[in-house]
Image: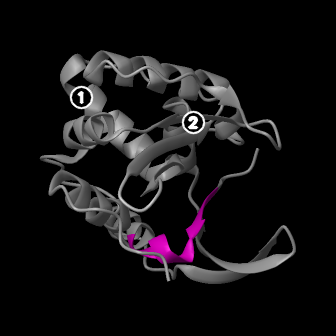
Amino acid sequence: RAHKLSIGLAWKDCEILEVIKSELEYTGNVRKVKMKYKSEDYFMALLQFSCLQVVNDLRALGIVENKSLILKPWTGPDHLMRHYWRGVVDGDGCLTSCGESQWQMNLAGNEFITKAFGTYCQCVSGTKAQARRAQQGNGWKVAFGGRQNVLSLVTHFYSDATISLARKWSLAKRIMAGLPPEPKS
């Protein structure tokens, strides 16, 4: 078994790896790595280190190799579930424009995660959206649209958040303020 922790994110989200690095009191660097996706170059932020205790502690919590393919949603106390799902949205979700003045919330993941997220969101706002298999690969996706649905969900997940991905928090604030998406250049 490998005793290495590797966390890779889009370079634009590298600040969250700096937070993790600080919390773990790790003194190494977050590396900028050039990758290819569909023949396009992009940069990834990579935090990687070896520590048997950290790796074993994460395994005990269900964070294992290739977890995205097998992960099942956490079932915790009701008062913590919105924070859990905000973290999932920060990691694998998207707050994006849908037309010039509308917002959409999407989540990509495996079948278990996307279906459970859809069910949770239905309980929060009454919105119904079906998780569907992605057109490419073996992933799944669930999407929510409509001004009131997205506002209700974003407010539920982000209104008093004390930790969130900065990029998603910025979009959430726009949505909660009733502002339209910024025009794409």
Residue at 55% x, 27% y is 113
Q: Name the residue under label 1.
A: 80
Residue at 36% x, 67% y is 167
Q: Which of 126 and 53 is in front in this view?
A: 126
Q: Are marks 1 and 2 in contact (CB under 8 Å)?
A: no
**Chain part drawn in magenta:** 5-15
- Asked which secondary structure carries label 1, the reply is helix
The answer to whether residue 14 is magenta is yes
Q: Nearer the viewer, residue 167 or 31?
A: 167
Q: Which mark is residue 59?
A: 2
The answer to whether residue 159 is magenta is no
Q: Which of 130 and 69 is in front in this view?
A: 130
Rendering coords of residue 42 (x, y %): 70, 79
First in sequence: mark 1 vs mark 2:
2
Kindly report the distance in space between the C-alpha atoms of the residues bearing marks 1 and 2: 21 Å
The amino acid on which the numbered mark 1 sits, given as a three-letter code, is Leu
Colour scheme in the image? one colour
Q: Residue furthest right?
A: 39
Rendering coords of residue 108 (x, y %): 59, 41
80 on left or right of 16: left
The amino acid on which the numbered mark 2 sits, given as a three-letter code, is Arg
Residue at 34% x, 42% y is 86
Q: Residue 182 carries which label?
A: none
